[in-house]
Image (cartoon, rainbow, N blue to C red):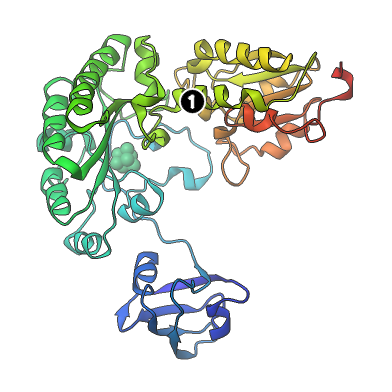
Amino acid sequence: MVKVARVHPGSIAEELGILPGTALLSVNGRQLDDFLDWEFLTAEENLEIEATQPDGGHVVYDVERPENEPMGLELEPPTVRRCANRCEFCFVEGLPKGLRRPLYIRDDDYRLSFAYGNFATLSNVKERDIARILEYRLSPLYVSVHATPWEARKKLLNNPRVPNILEQLGTLAAGGIQFHGQMVIVPGLNDGDVLEQSLTDLWNMGDAVLTVALVPVGLTQFSHLYTGKSMDAENAARILDAAERWGERARKERGFTWVTGSDELYLLSGRELPPPSFYGDYSQIENGVGAVTALRERVANGLDRLPRLDGRRIGVVTGTSMMPLMPPLLTQLQQATGGHFELIHAENSLFGPTTTTAGLLVGADIRRVLGARTDLDMALIPAETINENGLFLDDESFAAVREEFSMPVYASYDFIDVLELDGSQLELTAAGSA
Ligand code: SF4
């Protein structure tokens, strides 16, 4: 059963008299268990939909749906499948206590992998799920492989019952399903020979494995389960060596890089980040692969759209890891606009100084570094710090925090997105006007 959350005005659903709260039971005799069933079973034109109305009445809708016309309803969010593993490096285990409850949910859901690109380990996938993935052609999936040798994977996921990922991926690949894979690298566990074996196995699956991202283990001061070594510059360089060797082979034989190290590995090892051509369509950018290169590209391509900002003083807040990369970008912005851009470093007070990613800064950090500043005309903070409800990870609301400052503060992905707004949209403070 799936429940209706909203019905769009003028839609087929409204015409049928479907109301929010209606329980949809089956389509053409097939039981509905979740949004995937609804999505795929209603692809037909002739539908017999069995439902229970909010007042308890049982009803069967006969629908002749014109081709490509959506039903026009939204379902209540699915119950997310919980993770059956207990990885030592789990981000959720590295959260401090007292944050909002949803942050502590350890999801591992192949449905969300298909729908939103969330990575899933497939550890909790049963035969019936495999059959659904094949029937509905849920491709591509985003799979946390971590290691293909079974014993190493059991250790990494801290789960002795984890299925054999090679068998799972083999079955899905034979049914035409493709994947983006990720490996979170824990020094001593899945670097070296395990990494080599895993990349060999994934490479041998041919077209089924679209890309592989290598991501260093990320820990906070609260990662209480972790017993392994931390990632240092030397380890990062070794992992990049492997990635670049495989990447070169892939470019020769398949025409694209195939396996890439995340930006963090480059930053940790002190190596220069590759150019845009290395990342193709940036298919693992959400995983921190190519994000810095994409930012550089967006800034370079957006400079000629920027207005003059002569004499304006603009503060740019970032985290520790981006600090060395920012000056050249700010110089470009300065040259293009005439504004003065000041780089402002914020340490992470929630996770501790070892957490250096700008996107994990919290409301308290922004308040700490900008609160006393009365000399700026505007400040930009990383937009990744704020969720779709306008909240930082520490539950502070961006709207409330920005009210406390004497200058306007904007959440920005790439500077250009805010700075290209024309003067009337940019609330530069009168005090700071040239
Ligand atoms: S798979 Fe591991 S890292 Fe992911 S949610 Fe589960 S325990 Fe955490």
Residue type at mark 1? Answer: Phe
Q: Nearer the viewer, residue 331 or 371?
A: 331
Q: Quadrant of the C terminus?
A: top right
* Residue occupying image coordinates x 50% and y 13%: 325
The answer to whether the residue bearing label 1 lies less than 8 angstroms from the nearest atom of ligand 1 is: no
* Vertical position of residue 170 compared to residue 385: above or below: below
Q: Quadrant of the N terminus?
A: bottom left
* Residue occupying image coordinates x 25% and y 22%: 228
Q: Position of residue 406 (x, y in %)?
A: 81, 25
Q: Position of residue 160 (x, y in %)?
A: 15, 42
Q: Nearer the viewer, residue 332 or 48?
A: 332
Q: Nearer the viewer, residue 416 or 102?
A: 416
Q: Secondary structure at mark 1?
A: loop
* Residue 118 in the figure: left or right of residue 389: left
Q: Position of residue 172 (x, y in %)?
A: 17, 53
CA neighbours of label 1 inside 10 A, class few (<14), some (14 to 19), many (20+): many
Residue underneath mark 1: 351
* Vertical position of residue 8 compared to residue 275: above or below: below
* Vertical position of residue 433 compared to residue 422: above or below: above
* Residue 412 in the figure: left or right of residue 222: right
Give residue 205's quadrant in the image: top left
Total count of labels: 1
Give residue 37's quadrant in the image: bottom left
